Amino acid sequence: MRPVIKLLLFGAALFNGLVTARLFKPQDVVTLPRPGAASLSPNGTFAVYAQSTYHADQDKSVKNLFLLNLQTSSVSELTPPSFDSAQNEPFFLDDSHVAYVQNGQIHVINLDTTDKPYQLTDFPVDIANVKYNLQSKMLAFSAAVYDDGTLEGAKEREDHLRATKKDTALAYDKLMVRHWDAFTQEKQNNIFTVNVEDKEGRYQLANEVHNVLKYTGLQSPGFPSGDASDYDISPDGKHVAFVSKISSTRNAWETAQYVYIAPSSADYFPKAINNQIPAASSHPVYSSSGLLAYLQMSQPQYESDRNQIVIYNPATSTKQLVAKDWDRSPSQIMFSADEQILYAVAQEFGRDKVFAINISDDTITTLTEEGAASIVGVLPDGNLLLSISSMQHPSLLHTLDPKTRHLKMHPASDKLMEHLSHIDFLTPEEFVFEGSLGDKVHGWLIKPSNFDENQKYPVAFLIHGGPQSAWADSWSTRWNPQVFAGAGFVVVAINPHGSTGYGQKFTDSIQRNWGSYPYWDLEKGLDYVLSTYKFVDADRVAGLGASYGGYMINWINGHSNRFRALVNHDGMFSTLNSYYTTDELYFPEREFGGPPYHPLNRLVYERWSPSNFVQKWRTPTLVIHG
């Protein structure tokens, strides 16, 4: 564990006397408090965030708000925890008023008084994905509505259906019918705007609500996993930029998602600014002067194409491609106050790093080297507020000086810091070996608890999903490597061909090669570990994977006999069957070269289908599926 983190965690538990560390257990994964996304006060003094905590004894969770003073690095509980109500999506209306969503409506609390929180909105339906523009005092939020585009109409329709409809049947005339575990509904997410005003220290709505997407057939945030990053408000509050996927009979075959600009007053229809590129775009974000940056992919049907940064000037309708030769795929961008720098988050070598990109000459500076970072905001003094996690701790807030790259970690809530202080998190190591195509392949290794180099230990060989994903130095509430290490296993987690963060060519190489390059990487990586680390027991290796990792478990079962046991969580068994049952047809067509009803394409599906090798399965396998 990094020394600064150990020191902070030790200090959080001093009141308990000597710290007695224990190993990380599965129960900790679900009971450890989970901090959410933070929001900055305009003056940069405070950050507010929601934190959820699961109570196993009652099988219930609480979610309440915490306030971090960035000047004193002190954390206080802003709202009390309760099983009856949860607070989420907090943000600042000004330096002393915090707003948040509770029971689907916005509430406000005054930091300068002891007054009870009050309810700001009373809309007919629940809202979410709230953003606020300080300059124009404008709220924006999303709500699911029907074709008439009104909140009142949505409530009336829901009440009518609840009273008259006796079944749950839905009729569809186009795909997608379902996306992941959510069935497509008749109502769609729309973005609404409304202004607020401060009347004698108490906020209230100042005008009628406007539906920015009314009568357009567009949807934003996207269904089912879109969020507030799908849109942004211009600095003067006059426009909203948002992304929306195409709405047509080709929806299940295409990833095309365009950036639109619309008036916040809804006076005229939105205009697409990049619909000449039939690929995905995302994360629109305005600068202080009104420039609009967003992320743009170029390959149709491909969710894992490289994101490139585009800056659009609404005044001249011109575009600038930033750092076009940078072989990384950013997932988040934000302007500096002077608009000379774009801060970007991108995966690189098993980390989510923060980079500073000089807009004028494309010079790129790496600002963080370890962990998985996201940008909360730019402080008035030019520093960045980041949220950083690692394999050894969940997300914690940090202040970064981009000039010196000095990183200061802030504490979390007492409950979280105390919980962390009692756990001995094991330190991950790294290794690199020569994999398929002569490429260098990167992997992680965590030694087990109470490690003794003279003993032999079993191996938990973890295989990630995606397949375009990666094992990173980040926290996970699902497949957390610390759980396996705490149980006495050597954890091995390799990022084979197809993984992200090692260049786009490395990511793309898995296409039409699901069972070749990645499988060979995993086999070679296991060979490397067994020959390099003498404490690894070659006779006790268990392979575990989910999604694509589960596919690879099935593939391994038909091609390797070196594993003692296998665990397959939601893994593909038949590539052909998966094509005809998936809701995302663009995914298998991109990965396997097209639809399988064409004879040449079918050869690729058949070649990489684990179902064709069941006769060779010999290894005991735990299958988890839902």
Image (tube, rainbow, N blue to C red):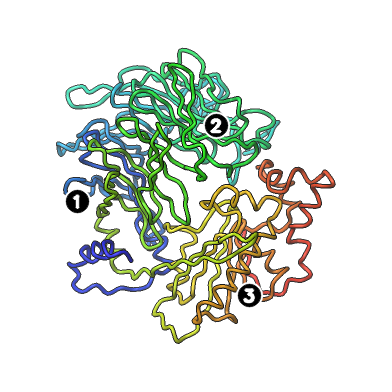
Separation of marks 2 and 1 at Cα, in angstroms: 51 Å
Residue 376: image tag: none
- Residue on which the image places disc 3: 563
Q: Residue at x 27, y 74 (%)?
A: 20
Q: Please identify the quadrant where the C terminus is shown.
A: bottom right
Residue 74: image tag: 1
* Residue 182, horizontal then vertical, whole percent: 58, 43
Disc 2 packing (10 Å; few <14; some 14–19; many ≥20): few
Can residue 6 be seen from the camera position used here?
yes
Residue 163: image tag: 2
Q: Residue at x 62, y 61 (%)?
A: 438
In this rendered view, identify the residue nearer to me: 357 or 155. Answer: 357
Label 2, secondary structure: give it: helix
- Work out whether 443 lies above or below 490: above
Identify the amino acid type marked 1. Answer: Ser
Can residue 52 be seen from the camera position used here?
no
- Residue at the far bottom in the pictured view: 454
Identify the amino acid type marked 2. Answer: Ala
